Amino acid sequence: MSKISISWLSLSDKQALQEVIELQSRLVLRSRSVEDAEKMGFLLSCPTYEFLQEFLLSRGKIAIAKEGKCVVGSALLETGETFLANYKSTQLSFPHLLPAAKEQFIKTGAFDYIHEICVGIDSLQRGIGSQLYYFIAKEFKYPLAVAAIVEQPTRNIASLAFFNKLGYKKCGEFYTPDLKGYSGVTSAMMTLE
């Protein structure tokens, strides 16, 4: 195993953009058994090349983890304002006790949104996801970071465990009536304690 290097993805690095798509395509829920997806984590859909370009141009940053010359992980980071603007149909609920200031940060988009962290199936359990998280955390602009982990249609147990290990706790829920071809998607809203 070679050393893992982590850097910000440049829009001009077309090869790495394509590798991120290939990596993520192997993690899509519909292409795997539910049991494997729950245990090893999943994405609801694979981004297109155009989505990643648009994300870099106007929404946020993408970090990539490379082993040698191969992309083995990626993380997408954007602001809460951008997240809320792009997911207008998403409803927020706070069934758990949440300080009023934290709830206000979330409702107004004053938070850093961890869009996703994914690691290739062949590279799991090597600390790459944690390295990606700590790399993007250096760029947090707000006192609050939020991650949304899918609980319905299927529970992403691996991602819930990953964020719990980092100290994140569930503080609410995001509900999106139609997301990436799925109806009634409920996600745990998790923040750092």
Image (spheres, grey):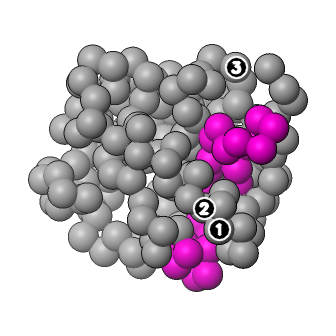
Count of numbered circles in the view? 3
Calculate the distance from the C-alpha at mark 1 to the C-alpha at mark 2: 5 Å
157 relative to 61, above or below: above
For disc 3, the neighbor class at 10 Å (few under 14, some 14 to 19, many from 20) is few
Q: Which mark is residue 63?
A: none
Front in this rendered view, residue 159 or 10: 10
Residues tagged 3 and 2 counted as in contact (Cβ below 8 A) = no
SS type, badge 1: helix
Q: Quadrant of residue 97?
A: top left
**Residue at the spot of label 2:** 17
Q: Quadrant of residue 122?
A: top right
Calculate the distance from the C-alpha at mark 3 to the C-alpha at mark 1: 26 Å
Judged left or right of residue 82, residue 63 is right
61 relative to 189, above or below: below
Q: Is residue 65 magenta?
A: yes
**Residue at the spot of label 1:** 14
SS type, badge 3: loop
**Residue at the spot of label 3:** 126
N-terminal-most mark, 3 or 2: 2
Q: Quadrant of the N terminus?
A: top right
Query: Residue at the spot x=70%, y=54% of the render?
Result: 63
Q: Amino acid at mark 2?
A: Leu
Judged left or right of residue 92, residue 18 is right
For disc 2, the neighbor class at 10 Å (few under 14, some 14 to 19, many from 20) is many
Q: Position of residue 143 (x, y in %)?
A: 71, 56
Judged left or right of residue 158, residue 114 is right
Judged left or right of residue 13, residue 181 is left
Mark 3 or 1: the one toward you: 1
Q: Which residues are magenta?
A: 53-79
101 relative to 156, above or below: below
SS type, badge 2: helix
Residues tagged 1 and 2 counted as in contact (Cβ below 8 A) = yes
